[in-house]
Image (cartoon, helix red, strand yellow):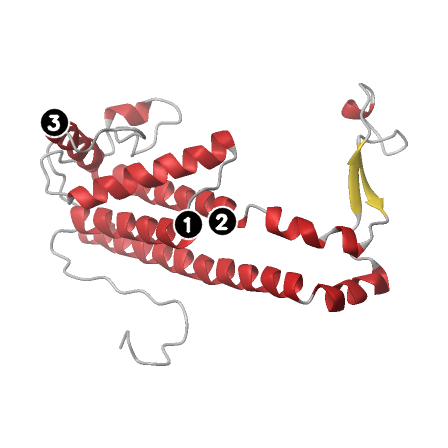
């Protein structure tokens, strides 16, 4: 079993700073996602008005592929290129494609990356000699994997140890819910990245990623009782 590592005040400051930055970025991204979803829905609902506006200057061009062995290795602009991205495109042909854009899947994949990088930073702080990190492309969450049978007490205990071990103490307390959240987002992210599936809900995925960041924070900073982050004007005074 690994031994918890004590960190000095400067390192605690950096942990606090990176945690707040990560949460701040995730919360801002949630607003950006929701705004994008709203604008897409508005464009689809008011498609006639939007199409009329787009007919004015055709801001969206048709993009196609016309590849040869030579065009794939073009060395100067006098040669043909395999991507042709300046074709006239009727706006009416676009609107039925709006619903096909994988906004939720792409957004969830980005949130997963933020959680992964946050956890990796914390490992480098608390357990810089963590053996798996000596391998290339190993992330902190590698020991909790999609498909784990968490109803099995032995598997749950194994997953708890795998969650906490990278941060220097595999015997630390961690909620079973944290393990379930991590397994779920890994399953969903993999289904999107490897199978192009998007059969999950963005809001639930977002909540899971926020919870995991907070679980890691409280695991590594046991003296902290609360963390509050709100990246916008606090109109209601909730974060005062």
**Measured from the top left, where is residue 89 in percent x and y?**
82, 50
Mark 3 Cα within 10 Å, few/some/many (few <14, many 20+)? Answer: few
**Residue for badge 1:** 201
Disc 2 or 1, which lies upstream in sequence?
A: 2
User: Which picture quadrant has residue 148?
Assistant: top left
In the rendered image, the vertical position of residue 78 relative to residue 17, given as above or below: above
The residue nearer to you, when weighing 135 against 229, is 229
**Measured from the top left, where is residue 30 in percent x and y?**
44, 59
Q: Please report the residue visible at 88 percent of the width from the left and 29 percent of the height from the top.
A: 79
Quadrant housing the N terminus: top left
Residue mark closest to the camera, 1 vs 3? 1
The residue nearer to you, when weighing 195 against 110, is 195
User: Which picture quadrant has residue 85?
Assistant: top right
Badge 3 vs badge 2, beta-carbon distance below 8 Å: no
Residue at disc 3, secondary structure = helix
Badge 2 vs badge 1, beta-carbon distance below 8 Å: yes
**Residue for badge 3:** 154
Residue at disc 1, secondary structure = loop
**Residue for badge 2:** 104
């Amino acid at each position: 079993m690994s031994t918890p590592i004590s960190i000095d005040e400067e390192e605690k400051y950096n942990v606090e700073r990176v945690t707040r930055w990560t949460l701040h970025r995730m919360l801002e991204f949630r607003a950006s996602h929701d705004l994008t979803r709203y604008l897409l829905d508005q464009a689809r609902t008011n498609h006639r008005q939007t199409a009329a506006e787009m007919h004015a200057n055709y801001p969206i061009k048709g993009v196609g592929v016309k590849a040869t062995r030579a065009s794939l290795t073009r060395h100067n602009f006098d040669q043909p290129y395999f991507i042709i991205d300046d074709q006239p495109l009727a706006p009416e042909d676009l609107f039925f494609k709006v619903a096909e854009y994988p906004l939720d899947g792409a957004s969830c994949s980005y949130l997963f990356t933020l959680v992964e990088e946050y956890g990796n930073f914390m490992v480098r702080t608390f357990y810089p000699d963590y053996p798996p990190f000596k391998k290339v492309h190993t992330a902190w969450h590698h020991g909790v994997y999609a498909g784990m049978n968490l109803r099995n007490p032995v598997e749950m205990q194994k997953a708890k140890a795998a969650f906490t071990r990278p941060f220097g103490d595999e015997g630390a307390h961690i909620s079973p819910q944290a393990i379930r959240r991590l397994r779920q987002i890994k399953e969903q992210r993999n289904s999107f990245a490897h199978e192009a599936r998007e059969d999950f809900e963005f809001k639930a995925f977002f909540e899971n990623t926020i919870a995991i960041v907070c679980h890691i924070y409280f695991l590594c900073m046991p003296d902290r009782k609360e963390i509050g982050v709100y990246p916008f004007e606090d109109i209601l005074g909730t974060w005062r």
